[in-house]
Amino acid sequence: MTHRFVCAFAAVILLAASAAAQQNSTAVTSNASIAIAVHPDLSGNWAYSIALPGGALKKVENGSTTYATLDLSGRMPAKTAVPGALPYTPAPSYKPEYQEKVKYLLDHEAKLDKVFFCGKPGVPRISSPRQIIQLPTETIFLYEDASGDPYRIVPTDGRPHRADADPSYYGDSIGHWEGETFVVESTNFVEDTWFGEGGYFHTSAMRVIERFWKVGDNLAYQITVDDPNVLTAPWTEAPRVIKPSNVPLEESPECIEDDAHRMDNLDHHLQR
Amino acid sequence: MTKKFTLTGTLTEVEWVNPHIAVYIDAKKEGGGVENWKFESAPPSWLRRVGVNSADFKKAIGQTVTVEGNRAKDGSTYGFLQKITFADGNSLEMVSPQLANTH
């Protein structure tokens, strides 16, 4: 870990009762007499990890040929064991009465998956953030996505979930540290999204846990999804390992999809 | 879309949009006249990550280009672009990663 992030939880809690005092938290943080918790700093730019088609580009320029390939490692399950990862299974376990529906959605994904029609992927399908900004009382996630460029603000000051928020694609998130792992719990979702490309529908009862931790200079990311209405048990996916990136974030171009009716196959990108 | 084919014409417009970019080409019609074709290609985020930006396409607007790809099964003036060759002989082509890795 080249950077460490000093988070004065104790100081923040003491000061939470007074907004005026909280403005002085920076000064209090430097007081060595208070208890402080030291967490890894996850801040920075991280490789794009949203699903993109595979393939490579062959470029011929002034007689010379070059090939460029995409580094898709951040969107794929890690190929080797990741220290700190939870046990995982390849797919969620749906209740028997919903298995046929999942298969139907998967078999017709090219027509039914809203993400292919500029829809918001939501949490957890948006995957890991392109940029993380870790602050003393909240952590900010920034994303690049074809549906728009969402952000999430994850409070880490111990507050509970919001009671008055409308259901949303990215849900209501709160975060805390478990040792060296940043744990984000999100609830209050709309039912429009799938939590995976395999037709993984869910209800508004879905609860998502995202875990972030450092493995060397890389960021490990692992999700657990629970929806007691449709799943037999919480599902933990294989971890992903995302590399640091020096590519600045860019605004995503407008999303316009009006040619999907031409697709003959029901399997987008012929991925299966 | 399964019919592989090649078309040469004048690049008239480039749409740098999600989920796929599109290029429009005026090509001569059999029996006379010109018709405008639309070819979709990769997502802009894909192209950005292999080092291509919108200017690489837009600089060729008004020039003669040749595209190779697949034509829509319904026979309309629509297709998927896999390769574009510009007037100066330079080209961009989507290939399999296996092919790239052998070079």
Image (spheres, coloured by chain):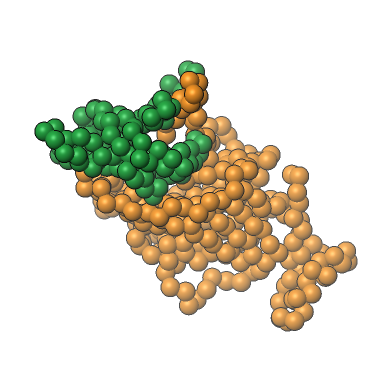
**Residue at (46, 42) in percent of width and height:** B55
Report whether residue B55 is seen.
yes
Please tell me the colour of chain A: orange
> Which of the 4 image quarters holds residue B80?
top left
Left/right of residue A258 with respect to residue A83 in the rendered view = left
Q: Nearer the viewer, residue A86 or B91?
A: B91
| Rendered location of residue A136, percent (x, y) | 71, 64
| Rendered location of residue B15, percent (x, y) | 36, 48
Total number of numbered labels? 0
| Residue lying furthest top | B102
**Residue at (83, 70) in percent of width and height:** A27
Above or below, comparing residue A193 to residue A245 in the picture: below
Q: Nearer the viewer, residue A272 or A36?
A: A272
**Residue at (53, 40) in percent of width and height:** A74
**Residue at (56, 51) in percent of width and height:** A249
Please tell me the colour of chain B: green
Left/right of residue A216 with respect to residue A257 in the rendered view = right
| Rendered location of residue A41, percent (x, y) | 70, 52
Q: Quadrant of the N terminus of chain B?
A: top left
| Rendered location of residue A146, percent (x, y) | 42, 52
Report whether residue A52 is seen.
no
